[in-house]
Image (tube, rainbow, N blue to C red):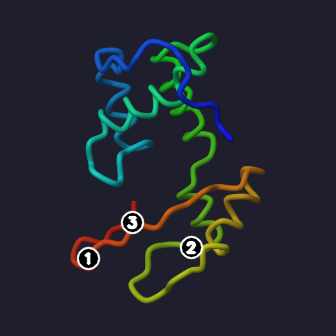
């Protein structure tokens, strides 16, 4: 379990500088509501505050960027021949297995359905 709900300074949007904000929109978007800033605030307030003795808010989000770059999940899935396809489907374990092999970590994934007219894979 990840540490959560620690006592610390609350999210300050002004500390997510424009350059970092642009990167986070790609690497850590809010896929549920599309409100990235609120999502990042919720993540900082719940988990980031627990790292505050070591990482300030800027460093916390920079670290998330470093992690995203070090494990490019899209490339990991491409190497496993898991790519967008209008007719092909994969099981949960088909997707988890190559990620786990590449990262030595078991990912927690959630599926989000979209209307076919809006479906896309990035």
Q: Quadrant of the N terminus?
A: top right
The disc placed on residue 82 is 2
Q: CA distance from mark 1 to mark 3?
A: 13 Å
Which badge, 2 or 3, comes first in the chain's sequence?
2
Q: Are marks 1 and 3 in contact (CB under 8 Å)?
A: no
- Tell which of 58 and 66 is nearer to you: 58
Q: Look at mark 3 in the image and give the residue it sits on.
A: 121
User: In this image, 10 relative to 95: left or right?
Assistant: left
Residue 81 location in percent, x, y?
Answer: 60, 74
Image quadrant of residue 35? top left
Which badge, 1 or 3, comes first in the chain's sequence?
1
The disc placed on residue 115 is 1
Residue drawn at x 35%, y 53% as measured from the top left: 31
User: In this image, 12 relative to 94: left or right?
Assistant: left
- Tell which of 8 and 80 is nearer to you: 8
Q: CA distance from mark 1 to mark 2?
A: 21 Å
């Amino acid at each position: 379990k990840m540490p959560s709900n620690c006592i610390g300074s609350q999210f300050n949007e002004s500390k997510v500088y424009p350059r970092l904000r642009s990167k986070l929109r790609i690497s850590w978007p809010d896929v549920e509501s599309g409100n990235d800033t609120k999502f990042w605030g919720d993540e900082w307030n719940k988990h980031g505050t627990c790292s505050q003795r070591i990482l300030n808010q800027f460093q916390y989000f920079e670290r998330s960027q470093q992690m995203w770059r070090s494990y490019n999940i899209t490339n990991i899935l491409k190497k496993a021949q898991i790519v967008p396809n209008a007719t092909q489907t994969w099981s949960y374990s088909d997707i988890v297995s190559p990620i786990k092999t590449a990262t030595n970590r078991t990912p927690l994934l959630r599926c989000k359905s979209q209307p076919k007219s809006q479906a896309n894979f990035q």
